[in-house]
Image (cartoon, grey):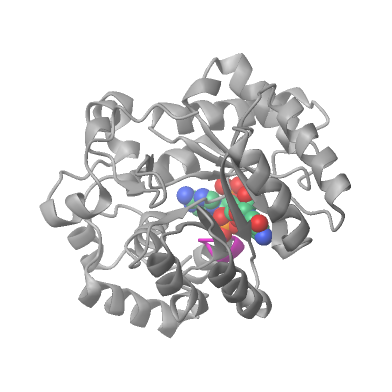
Amino acid sequence: MMNNDKMELSRRELIKLGAVAGVSVLAGGWSLLQAQSDSLMSITIPSSGEKLPAVGLGTRDYRSDNDPSEMQRFRQTMQAFHTGGGRVIDTSPNYGNAENVVSGLLRDLDIRDDMFIATKVDREDAEAGKKRMENSLESFATSSIDLMQVHNLRGTEAELKTMQAWKEQGRLRYIGITTHSPRQYKEMEAVMRKHALDFVQLNYSLADRGAAQRLLPLARDRGMAVLVNLPFARGRLFRVVADQSLPGWAAEMDASSWGQVFLKYVISAPAETLPIPGTTKPHHAIDNLGALSGRLPDAGLRLQIEKTIDALL
Ligand SMILES: NC(=O)c1ccc[n+]([C@@H]2O[C@H](COP(=O)([O-])OP(=O)(O)OC[C@H]3O[C@@H](n4cnc5c(N)ncnc54)[C@H](OP(=O)(O)O)[C@@H]3O)[C@@H](O)[C@H]2O)c1
């Protein structure tokens, strides 16, 4: 569960303030970042009012056969994510043994209670779904998971029924659905209109903006927070800008890297959007958390960013 004492200001309040000093973590180090932790950008979960830091961590690649150097890298990344103010971790029993790897790292680092765990279920059959969710509770050695999501809309009606009941029993704090494909947007929309969900998870990035047409406005209207997967289009955005230096306008949004431009573009979308970039590298986790500080692009700058990237895609 989350400790959100540190997050007094909502994202919108921060946008209004506009000029919270940016932090270049790579240049400035931890102490500077920690000193700023009370002004980190957050989103508000509409169904509860709970705040979460506006950048999370995707753990699709946290599968391991216990190779010590790989485990050390995962551990350092998780530690960096926590120290930098990150709380939201997205995982799934479909990512090999990632749930167990993540759970073990959080326990070893003694940071479990600070974290907000989002995981998934994807069985067509209700009984199989219950078993799958029991396993997730067991993996995290907990009686309550923060967020359970129907993975890629598989078994939606059966799973949501169980998830709603488990939420009432306190076994799940929040419930939601996920997709990573425009082919499922129609179905996402129908499920969002039919069910009272706390969260939706979908793909949205500068390279893939389709969710902004109907799903993001609908999430805002229906009071659903949005976890954003593939915020770097699986790394494609970095390849596109590989030989491009950061444009002058990046300073207007206090972005000191392309990664922060990409994440601030997602965070500044008109909904409660929280990107969950995937990384297993500590320096990338630190870079990504830099997007929690400083100004966000306004509508005019968002257009300029889109134009710059469109010319490169
Ligand atoms: N349907 C679903 O529910 C669904 C589908 C897809 C994904 N997801 C979730 O979304 C998460 C994110 O998706 P993803 O990891 O596939 O794609 P992504 O976040 O768009 O991109 C990840 C790629 O970006 C690189 N990267 C991360 N931070 C970087 C930085 N600061 N500078 C340069 N490169 C950086 C990573 O490499 P390094 O590892 O080298 O840093 C990796 O190659 C997943 O881990 C998963 O939790 C959910």
Residue 254 location, quadrant: bottom left
Residue located at (61% from left, 61% from top): 234
Is residue 114 rendered to the left or right of residue 158? left
Residue 60 in view (yes/no): no
Q: Is residue 140 magenta?
A: no
Left or right of 201? Residue 133 is: right
What kind of secondary structure does the magenta stretch mostly adopt? loop
Residue under the point 22% across and 26% down: 35
Quadrant of the rendered image containing residue 137: top right
Q: Nearer the viewer, residue 310 or 108?
A: 108
- The location of residue 313, given as percent across then percent down, is 50, 80
Q: Position of residue 244 (x, y in %)?
A: 40, 68
The quarter of the displayed image where residue 169 is located = top right
Q: Position of residue 158 (x, y in %)?
A: 77, 57
- Is 124 placed above or below 127 here? below
Specify start and end residues of the magenta stretch as a single range: 230-234
